Amino acid sequence: MQATIVEAVNDALHEEMDRDDRVVVFGEDVAESGGVFRATDELLEEFGSERVVDTPLSEIAIVGGATGMAMYGYRPVAEIQFSGFLPPAFDQLVTNASRIRWRTRGELTAPMVVRMPYGAGVRALEHHSESLEGAYGHLPGLQVVVPSTPADTKGLLTAAIRDPDPVLFMEPKRIYRSIREEVPEGEYEVPIGEAAVRREGEDLTVVAWGAMMPPTLDAVDDGDVDAEVIDLRTISPLDTETVVESVKKTGRCVVVHEGPRTLGVGSEIVARINDEALMYLESPIERVTGFDTPVPLLSMEDFYFPHPPRILDGIEAALAD
Amino acid sequence: MSDRASDIRAPPAVGDDGGGEVRYLSQSDLEVPTHQIVSPDGSYDDEAIPDLDDEELLDLYRWMVTDRVFSRRMVNIQRRGELGTFGSTRGQEASIIGSAFTLSPDDWLYVGRAWTPMFMRGASMKDMILFWRGIEEGQEAFAKVNAQIAISIGSHLPLVSGIAWGMHLDDADAIATAYLGDGATSTGAAHEGINLASSVGLPALFYCQNNQYAISMPYEKQSGANTIAQKALAYGIDAIRVDGQDVLAVYDAVSSAREKVLEGEPVFVESVTYRLDAHTTSDDPTRYRTDEEVDHWEEHDPIERYREFLKSEGLWSEIDHDAIVEEIDAEFDEALAAANAMEERAVAEMFTHVYDELPPELARQLDEFEELLERRPEMYDFIEQRPKG
């Protein structure tokens, strides 16, 4: 079937709720209204009010409640309405969800998914534009997944729901409806922890993910560059091998991300290339990222996150030396 | 979908006749009773005694003594350098035992400053020694009896509501219980956890041991609320305030609460008690409270009060106090020996349980570290010799 990213989220939720009675969906405005982006549309009608629940405006309770429910044996899929509202509940990820297995040596686990739209560029108010996957990826025990295509969204969300450990599932809301492609019908799983090579190329490697994928591909096209473009798809655990193997081949690399540069995922990617492929590098690795500022309010947000000309500038710098 | 035209969820407010006067909703108008069965002078009303047989009444005493002896022994071995730290429960025995005695093995339990409930559920003193020694097998053992110790104050209330939510979906004949302290009631997580249980209608029991102090902060500075129990009303759930030095009153209150909770009505219980010892062995309570105050609470010793009750009931003759203490001491000695005999674990222990499967980067870190330890055995000497504490 043809679907957008947000429709793929909805499809995966329908499939998994149908397949497994233990899957329970809850969050703010997810049931009666079907979610502010309609990601949970029609779930209430199909699966009933015990399994599709509108919660109070209460992020700590949503994430902490999901953790407890998962410890008890269910498979909660909790929604945080915008990633900018996760921080109050970050404590529950740090203090509980990410370390239940570790704390009890596997006796208890927290197989849960927290879904949330992230990223700038939708002309929203403050706190609706963050891209903090680097901060969340810093947490041992928490997996962080960021799809960029409808098919991957379905496959990765399915894998996240089935995963025995907690997954933070960050949905690129700027491209929620801008890409429509063929998405497999029925059960479809894409493994967590594996990057995808979107374009094969020889001259340099470009690594991006989530909402940065379309502008990155556009930049490569605009510059007519023979680039290998890697969609990371999972921030934690990071697929080092795919990146390193590509860099060994091309000798040059650009990392593109929306979040702040300092201690961002790009820093880690540079470090891993440094560890395993330093002698293959023909030029310094470029980072094209958001700045170390809060995401600007909507009047200036377009200057904050990378657009194709800025990405192409980074590509040209990496190719120049 | 309901027909919204005939189903108005949010009707406009209808005023009543206040004669034009602004009327406040005020805690000063609240009457918050405190449940008590055996008064401090040992007197009680026969009719008020909970329905427990003699063996159960004697068990309450044995468990309270267990709690006291365990705290004494743990403080002692900590002073000998055999534990990192420890939080004594002395003074809170009635509050801890009376409540935990009501729970069933299928109930889930998240505790703070209440260790003996783990023993009542079948975990061992050895497991608790391991926990305080920072060995993960402790929490693993507690997990096997559906219990955990919460360390980050208040953070466990949303988890308990989540567990209760699972029980609700599962139609389980059990409840989830959070033990918390007076300090925890100031956290956002406690607020959100209780509110979730109330709004969904979950089988969660919130048992607050108000032991008067969050480390050095007395309850009167912790909150402007006269009682903690009254806070429950704001969530639309019922509360009980109980004399936490009276084991029978605690038992009575919590078993009543548990029945209600089983029906999907969360209940909040405030047990008014006192921490006679330090917050942990690292704390010096003389910096923030007077000897007079502590002496006053020493006179309200929960074990003494219960002893008077057992005497009045003619049950004291059934108790050989010294033999009980001796037995618990022996159990502790055995637990300590077993804990001491635990083999040292390999460093892989740190890495193994973070995920179901070790991710490649973590596997790499483990390999590198094991290789380093082999190459530089002085690592072990350094760690052995580093001053601890």
Image (tube, coloured by chain):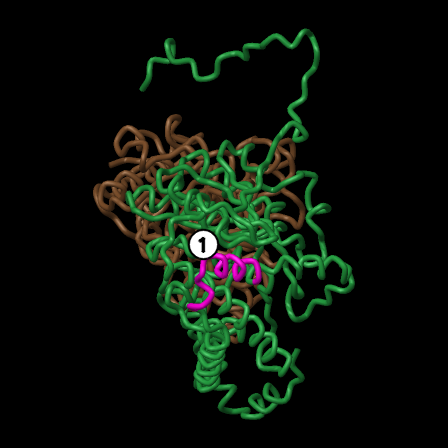
Chain colours: A brown, B green
Q: Secondary structure at mark 1?
A: strand
Crowd rating for badge 1 (residues with CA inside 10 Å; few <14, some 14–19, many 20+): many
**Front one among B177 and B331:** B331
Q: Quadrant of the C terminus of chain B?
A: bottom right
Rendering coords of residue B370 (x, y %):
47, 84
Amino acid, disc 1: Val
Q: Residue at x 35, y 36 (%)?
A: A4
Q: Which residue is mark 1?
A: A144
Q: Is-magenta flag for residue B308?
A: yes
Rendering coords of residue A48 (x, y %):
28, 32
With B348 as the anchor, is B299 left or right in this view? Answer: right
- Give, as a single range, the part of the protein colored magenta: B304-318
Q: What kind of secondary structure does the magenta stretch mostly adopt?
A: helix
Chain of residue at mark 1: A
Task: Reply above or below: A248 against B334.
Answer: above
Rendering coords of residue B25 (x, y %):
64, 24
**Front one among B180 and A120:** B180
Q: Is residue A315 visible?
A: no
Q: Residue at x 37, y 30 (%)?
A: A31
Q: Quadrant of the N terminus of chain B?
A: top left
With A185 as the anchor, is B311 left or right in this view? Answer: right
Q: Count the marks: how many?
A: 1
Q: Is-magenta flag for residue A304?
A: no
Task: Reply above or below: B228 against B131.
Answer: above
**Front one among B279 and A219:** B279
Task: Reply above or below: B86 against A94.
Answer: below
Rendering coords of residue A106 (x, y %):
37, 66
